[in-house]
Image (tube, grey):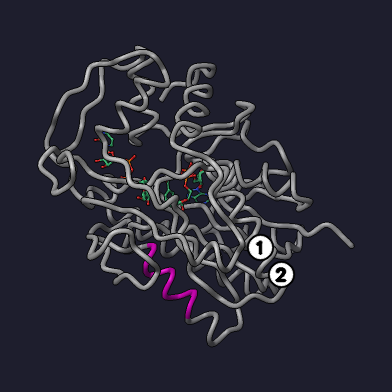
Amino acid sequence: MSVKKVLVVGGAGYIGSHNCLALAERGYQPIVFDNLTNGHAEFVKWGPLEEGDIRDRARLDEVFAKHQPDAVLHFAALIEVGESVKNPVAFYDNNVIGALTLLSAAMDAGVKAFVFSSTCATYGLPQQVPMDETHAQAPINPYGRTKFIIEQALKDYSTYKGLRSVMLRYFNAAGADFEGRIGEWHTPETHAIPLAIEAALGRREGFKVFGTDYDTRDGTCVRDYIHVLDLADAHVRALDYLLAGGETVELNLGTGTGTTVKELLAAISDVSGRPFPVEYAARREGDSTSLVANNEKARAVLGWEPRYTLHDIIQSAWNWHSRSNHVL
Ligand SMILES: NC(=O)c1ccc[n+]([C@@H]2O[C@H](COP(=O)([O-])OP(=O)(O)OC[C@H]3O[C@@H](n4cnc5c(N)ncnc54)[C@H](O)[C@@H]3O)[C@@H](O)[C@H]2O)c1
Ligand SMILES: O=c1ccn([C@@H]2O[C@H](COP(=O)(O)OP(=O)(O)O[C@H]3O[C@H](CO)[C@@H](O)[C@H](O)[C@H]3O)[C@@H](O)[C@H]2O)c(=O)[nH]1
């Protein structure tokens, strides 16, 4: 059987690069398409890099014609909730126009399987926790809305155009390759775990907790942190599923366990053995109180289950950040 080629769009980024590693380990050939605005050429280690922007249809057509991929994994997007509130135009341009351009190019090139990075941010405020896939989708920030729009397009394209897709609603991606080859490297970094680790390493003055008056067990936001390699495993399974004829489906990817910001900071101090200064600040606009997954559907459809604990997440992230000298 010939090796299946997968176009990994946004594959030079954090989650995309860990997916390339998992694809290569499981017998797929990843081909990265990335404009390198937020990605890193040195993270592209398991296949070729094609530089390009998803809003550039001619460049997409060229790459589809050259590689003729069997499937597409689409990670490329602007990702920060807070930034989406400040600059929604850039988010709609990249996450909606870009994704729709990519989808048209993929369908015209005959691609029949598409895996989309969606997010629990499409749910908005929790009506019940944990949330399953039937939870109302009422995003509370432009980032979540851009992802929700693409989910709706994917459902229409599935019904009316025959493009089968898996929409993976990740909760909070975290952690890194245990061998330290790649890791989380966003510039500027806005995510809680890398920022707290940088504080523990003494590379930042401290960590600011955004909001202590939420209706949660200690007043800080609750999130479901999931290891990036567990996400990658789910993507490979989603590909296997689609290539075997599986129908369009949306699936939560989370552990089912919620952690408050305060609990997260305590766990990071514990793993690192280095306490760091913590400041309590105002809420960050666009943040939901609590986002925790019910992951039963992904378990049932993909036979997937998360393998790594919060401790594994922090330990692997700590290894990556303490060894690497990149600037966040
Ligand atoms: N990090 C999380 O916790 C999280 C949670 C839920 C969903 N997601 C989604 O997962 C995906 C990947 O997130 P990440 O943390 O790896 O982000 P990232 O910024 O590290 O990776 C995104 C990659 O896409 C590339 N890219 C962006 N716009 C592009 C464009 N127009 N054309 C070509 N390439 C482009 C960037 O250069 C980067 O390499 C995103 O779609 C994000 O919305 C992330
Ligand atoms: O300096 C900081 C950074 C974050 N937080 C809090 O930590 C939690 C996690 O924040 P962060 O790591 O920035 O992740 P989210 O804002 O939850 O967003 C991530 O997770 C979403 C899914 O929940 C994805 O869709 C987004 O792409 C991804 O950026 C939130 O309660 C933040 O308010 C702080 O208190 N201080």
Report which quarter residue 261 is drawn in. top left
Residue that numbered label 1 is attached to: 239
Q: Secondary structure at mark 2?
A: helix
Can you give x and y, in whole percent of width and height, for residue 90 in the image? 34, 53
Say if disc 1 is inside 8 Å of ligand 1: no
User: As rendered, which of 283 and 264 lies closer to the eye?
Assistant: 264
Can you give x and y, in whole percent of width and height, for residue 18 in the image? 60, 41
Q: Sort mark 1 into few (<14), some (14-19) or many (20+) by Cα contacts within 10 Å.
A: many
User: As rendered, which of 101 and 273 lies closer to the eye?
Assistant: 273
Disc on res. 243: 2
Amino acid type at mark 2: Leu
User: As rendered, which of 72 and 18 lies closer to the eye?
Assistant: 18
- Magenta segment: 147-155
Q: Indicate whether residue 152 is drawn in magenta.
A: yes
Q: Sort mark 2 into few (<14), some (14-19) or many (20+) by Cα contacts within 10 Å.
A: some
- Main SS, magenta region, reads helix
The residue positioned 38% from the left and 23% from the top of the image is 197
Q: Is residue 156 above or below residue 48?
A: below
Q: Secondary structure at mark 1?
A: helix
The residue positioned 18% from the left and 46% from the top of the image is 216
Report which quarter residue 211 is drawn in. top left
Say if disc 2 is inside 8 Å of ligand 1: no
Report which quarter residue 112 is drawn in. bottom right
Q: Indicate whether residue 285 is drawn in magenta.
A: no
